[in-house]
Image (cartoon, coloured by chain):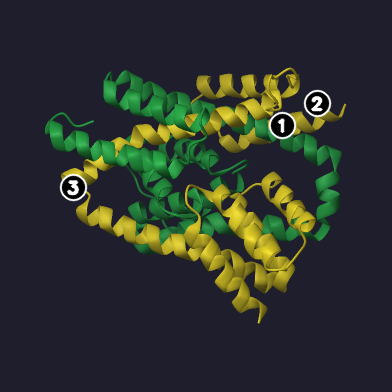
Chain colours: A green, B yellow
Amino acid sequence: MRKPKNHLELFLACAGVSALTLGGGYVIVPLMQKNFVERYGWFSEEEMLEIVALGQSAPGSIALNTANLVGWRTLGLSGAIAGVCGSILPPMAIILVVSMFYLRFRDNAVVAAALLGMTAGVSALIMDAVCTMLYKIIGARKILPILLCAGAFAAAFFFGANAVYILVFCAVFGVLVGARGGEGRL
Amino acid sequence: MVYLRLLIAFLQVGLFTFGGGYASLPLMQDQAVGGGWMTLPEFSDMLAISQMTPGPVAINLATFVGLRMGGVPGAVVATVAYAIPSFVIVSVMAALVRRYGELRHVQNAIAGLKPGVVGLIFAAGLSIVLSAVLGNVFPFTSVDWVALILFAGAFAALRRFKRLSPLLVISICGAAGGVLYTV
C-alpha cells in the first residue's frame, strides 16, 4: 500500500470525491472505493470497508467522517484536517456560486436534465461498488456475514429501519459471536 | 449576534446527526424555521438546491442557511460548526482504534460491522436506482428510458473497465442527460 505523497494530494483527492457526491452520503463510498482503493492504492478493499463502517458509526456526514479517517490512516491528525477541509470546500464554493442565482438555477430545464443524467451515472457507480463488495462477501462462503449483510439490507430497504440501530446490532453480534466462537470469528 | 447564534445552532446539529447527513435535515429545519430565521417555503427551496448540487447535502444546506443569515462569514461559521463535533468524535475514534484496534472485541465488532455496511449501501443504492429509473412511484408504471439506458451503459462500462474515472462517467452521463432529456 502506498501513501499519499503529501497533504495536497490528500486534500485534492478528498475534494474530488466530495465534489462528485450527488444524492447522499452513500455515494461517497463507491467513489472512494474506486479512487482510493483501485486507482491510488492507498488502502485494501478490506481496510476501506472498515473505514466506512467506522465513519458510519459516528455522528455527522458519512463523507466528512470517511475523509477524516482516510486522513488519519495515511498522514495522521494533519491528514485528517486536510481530508475534511478538502471535503468541505468544493460544496461550499458551489453553493456560494449557485445561491447568487438560485431560483433561475432551480428552474432551468437544461440544468435539471443534466442532473438527472448525472444521477443515473451515480447510480451505476454505487451498484458497481456494491457488486464488488457483495462478490467478496459471498465468495468467502461464510454463512454469518452473508446473513448479516442480507439482514441489514432487508431491514433498511423493506422496513426503513434506522441505520444506527442496524449498525449497533451488527457490532454487538460480531462481538458476541467472536466471544463465543473463539477461533470461529465472523 | 448572528454568528454566535449560527455557531451554537450548527454545533448542535452536527452533534446530533446520527446515521448520515440526511439525519441532519429535520434538525436544521428546527433551527432555521423553528427559530424564525426563514419561512418553510424558503427553507424547502434551499433544501431542494442542496440536494441537486454536488457535495454532502448537510454541508450544502449549512452553507446555504449560513450565507442567508450572515453572508459569506456566516456560511463559513455554519459549515465549520456543523463539521466540528463529528471531527472531534471521529478523531478520538481513530486514535482509539489505532491504540486498541488489535483487541479481540474491537476486531470482532468491526468484523460484524463490515457486512452490515455493505447491506446498508446496497439498500441505499437500490433506492437511488429505483428513484432514478422508475421515478420511485409504486407500482413503477413510468419507466424513465433515458435514465435506464444511461444507468445500464455506465454500469456495463464500469464493470468492464475497472480503472474508469468516476468523474468521466458522471460527466458523460450529465452531458448525455442534458442533450437527451431536452430534445
Q: Residue at x 69, y 47 (%)?
A: B53
Q: Residue furthest left?
A: A182
Q: Earlier along the polypeptide chain: callout 2 or callout 3?
A: 3
Relative horizontal placement of residue B99, taking residue B30 as reference (left or right): left
- Amino acid, disc 2: Leu
What residue is shown at x 65% (from left), y 82% (from top)?
B1
Q: Amino acid at mark 1?
A: Gly
Chain letter belonging to callout 1: A
- Residue A131 appears anywhere in the view: yes
Q: Is residue A42 visible?
A: no
- Percent across and percent down for residue A117 are 71, 31
Secondary structure category for the residue under label 3: loop
Residue receiving disc 1: A117
Question: Is B171 or A164 nearer to us in this picture?
Answer: A164
- Give the residue at mark 2: B180
| Residue at the spot 17% in from the left edge and 43% down from the top edge | B104
**Local crowd size for mark 2, using a 10 Å CA cut-off: few (<14), some (14–19), many (≥20):** some
Q: Chain of mark 2?
A: B
Q: Nearer the viewer, mark 2 or mark 3?
A: 3
Q: Which mark is on residue A49? A: none
Q: Residue A85 in the image: x percent, y percent? A: 52, 61
Query: Considering depth in this image, is A33 or B82 the residue closer to the camera?
Result: B82
Residue A25 image point, x, y percent = 54, 44
Say above or below: B11 vs A141: below
Q: Which residue is mark 3?
A: B102
The chain ID associated with circle 3 is B
Amino acid marked by disc 3: Glu
Label 1 Cα crowd, 10 Å radius (few <14 / some 14-19 / many 20+): many
Give SS at disc 2.
Answer: helix
Q: Are marks 2 and 1 in contact (CB under 8 Å)?
A: yes
Question: Which quarter of the picture shows residue A17?
Answer: top right
Q: Are marks 2 and 3 in contact (CB under 8 Å)?
A: no
